[in-house]
Amino acid sequence: MNTLLAIVIVVQVVTALVIIGLVLLQHGKGADMGAAFGSGASGSLFGASGSSNFLSRSTGIAAAVFFAATLALSFLGSRPIAAGGAGVMDQIPATPATPAKPQNPAGQPQPSGPASGQSGEIPK
């Protein structure tokens, strides 16, 4: 299960980087990175409008893969932990710890009961 989760996280990070790169390569209104790589040139590998169609299509495919990876991560994250794995809260002991006896300033336990000079009666 951890291997599948790691693979989905890697796919999501890689597709996020691909989307960032593809968006930067697309031709915009101003002088952007796409113009520096020749995406506005009519004699490009994909033709006059072929590069914009190819980049738009590639961005859409990368966005669909990113969306699928996000859904997979949310599905894997919402599933209960398998019997072999335990969460942080499962490691807390079920029984409460016994309270420590109060200490006097010398570090010795305080005596309790009527032998300590205290009677069980409430003063009036």
Image: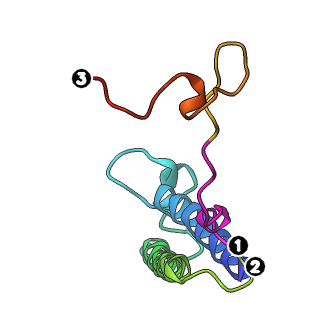
Residue type at mark 2?
Thr
Q: Position of residue 66 (x, y in %)?
A: 51, 75
User: Which quadrant, please, contains the C terminus?
Assistant: top left
Q: Nearer the viewer, residue 114 or 64?
A: 114
Magenta-span inclusion, residue 92: yes
Q: Nearer the viewer, residue 16 or 102?
A: 102
Q: Position of residue 22 (x, y in %)?
A: 52, 64
Horizontal side, residue 62 vs residue 87: left or right: left
Q: Point out the residue furthest to the left here.
A: 124
Name the residue rendered at 64%, 74% in the picture.
11
Q: Is residue 15 above or below residue 123?
A: below
How is this picture coloured? rainbow
Q: Which mark is residue 44?
A: none
Residue type at mark 1?
Ala
The residue pinned by badge 2 equals 3
Q: Position of residue 92 (x, y in %)?
A: 64, 61
The residue pinned by badge 1 equals 6
Magenta-span inclusion, residue 53: no
Q: Is residue 24 above or below residue 117?
A: below
Q: Residues within 10 Å of mark 2 (few under 14, many from 20)?
A: few
